[in-house]
Image (cartoon, rainbow, N blue to C red):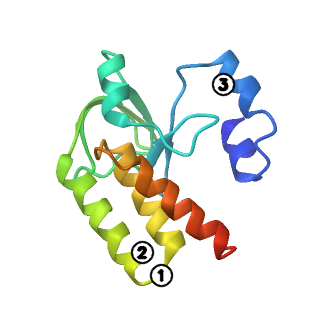
Amino acid sequence: MEFGDDCSGFKGYAKLLKEKYPTAHFYHFWGKYFHDFTSDTANLKQMLADSPCVLLYGQPYQEFPNKFLKLEEIESSPNESVYKILATTAEEAVTAYLVSKRAAARQHYKDAYIFALKAQSLGFPNIDEYILQLKTLLQQNQVR
């Protein structure tokens, strides 16, 4: 339900789903970040701090690259696997932030925004104001 609601661009059921499943989070395969029903991103470091066990379900290592997350495989079959997230790498958060800054300097605000969200979801500190600035620039330039 989340995938269809999110990909349709409507998010008509987001609030209801968030109320019903308040701790549910999802991995955005294309953007490589985590989010919940109502927000663009979720802070993975906070998720790991709040829960002793965060599990991922998906295709074996194609969706969850090793350099992005430190994982423990719990169960696997040829088409699907379950992993426990052990940690996220700080290096990836810094890299996403730097890529975002470079894109912003080139006035590629959509790319900058996507990478800033990725950096935020990986736990990059004090990035909220920067994300708001990018969102404003996107709106001013009418880029979505």
Task: Report, in whole angstroms, how far the alpha carbon at label 1 lies from the one at label 2.
Answer: 5 Å
Side of 25 where 18 appears, left or right:
right
| Vertical order, 77 against 136 (above or below) | above
The alpha-carbon separation of the residues under discs 3 and 1 comes to 34 Å
In the structure shown, which secondary structural element does the residue marked by tag 2 occupy?
helix
Residue 8: percent from the left, percent from the top? Answer: 77, 52
- Disc 3 residue type (three-letter): Lys
Is 53 situated left or right of 34 in this image?
left
Badge 1: how crowded within 10 Å, few (<14), some, or many (20+)? some
In the foreground, 8 or 137: 137
Residue at 51 percent of width and 31 percent of height: 25
- The mark tally for this picture is 3
Residue 30 at least partly seen:
no
Which amino acid does the dot numbered 2 rest on? Ala
Image location of residue 61, percent across then percent down:
33, 48
Dot 3 or dot 2: first in sequence order is: 3
Dot 3 or dot 1: first in sequence order is 3
Q: Residue at x 41, y 58 (%)?
A: 116
Tell me if label 1 and label 2 are in contact, CB under 8 Å: yes
Name the mark on residue 68. Answer: none
Q: Quadrant of the C terminus?
A: bottom right
Quadrant for the N terminus, please: top right
Residue under numbered circle 2:
104
Q: Is residue 10 toward the left or the right of residue 113 in the image?
A: right
Residue pictured at 48% horizontal, 63% vertical: 113
Q: Which mark is residue 107?
A: 1
| Residue 99 coordinates in the image, percent (x, y) | 32, 70
Mark 3, residue position: 18
Front: mark 3 or 2: 2
